[in-house]
Amino acid sequence: MSIILPIDKLPELSAINYHNLTSKNLLLIFTRNPQLGKCKTRLAATVGNQTALDIYKFLLNHTINITKNLNVAKQVWYSEEVWEDDIWDGKVYDKKLQKGDDLGTRMGNAFQEGFAQGFERIIIIGSDMFDLNQKDLEKAFKKLHDNDYVVGPADDGGYYLLGMTNYKNELFTEKSWGQDTVLQDTLTNLKNEKCHILDTRNDVDLYDDIKDIDAFQPFLKNIEE
């Protein structure tokens, strides 16, 4: 026997969280737990661990701002452990723990879980893309209606976004993660597939990536080149 609650007794759901239950589109957000000395280590080599952490937290907030209003299901995947009471609103983002020994395995596992849950179009991004906005993500999902794959190239030879309608395991194997060959190797895997290439964008890994951007100047005012 089913019990139908009066509308005023239903659990409170935001309009955004409703899409986590009904959408066939899924956004995966991979993030590192923001801990001193454990994030943006290449940037920290120039600006120091505390400034690197402050910048990373700024980037996390930017990622929230460009994703929270998307009409898609959203999952944030933590690198170390799931934090329940942090800046990621549990009413908007499902929270997951990354699984695997390397980045490729962890991303592949997240995609496979998403398809197993019944999602039809899945996109993954990191949490350090200041050059990315909500319209970029909406465009990427739209492109997956006419393409099987979508890739967002990064200036450093990697990619900032990968989306698909069918899981393809070779995209996550035999890659030198963190090196400038990842994008080309990925596109080689997709050469016989229907794939849309988005505009190239800059991600934030090094001091040179942010030194001329106004939004980062408050963090860099005491940094000497």
Image (cartoon, rainbow, N blue to C red):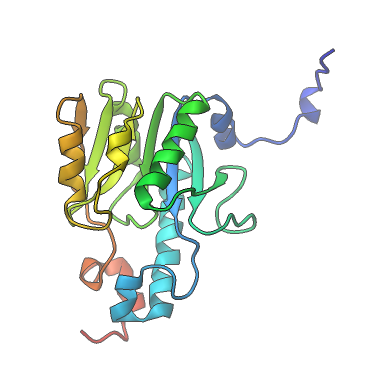
Q: Position of residue 162 (x, y in %)?
A: 30, 39
Can see residue 214?
Answer: yes
From the viewer's perspective, tell me whether residue 19 is left or right of residue 150: right
Q: Looking at the image, which is closer to me, 78 or 106?
A: 106
Q: Quadrant of residue 165?
A: top left
Q: Quadrant of residue 51?
A: bottom left
From the viewer's perspective, tell me whether residue 187 is left or right of residue 165: left
Q: Position of residue 76 (x, y in %)?
A: 50, 47
Residue at 37%, 37% (x, y): give it. 123
Does 28 appear above or below 37? above
Q: Position of residue 133 (x, y in %)?
A: 33, 47
Q: Looking at the image, which is closer to me, 139 or 163?
A: 163
Q: Quadrant of the C terminus?
A: bottom left
Q: Looking at the image, which is closer to me, 89 or 174?
A: 174
Q: Position of residue 37 (x, y in %)?
A: 44, 75
Residue at 32%, 55% (x, y): give it. 129
Residue at 48%, 56% (x, y): give it. 79
Q: Quadrant of the N terminus?
A: top right
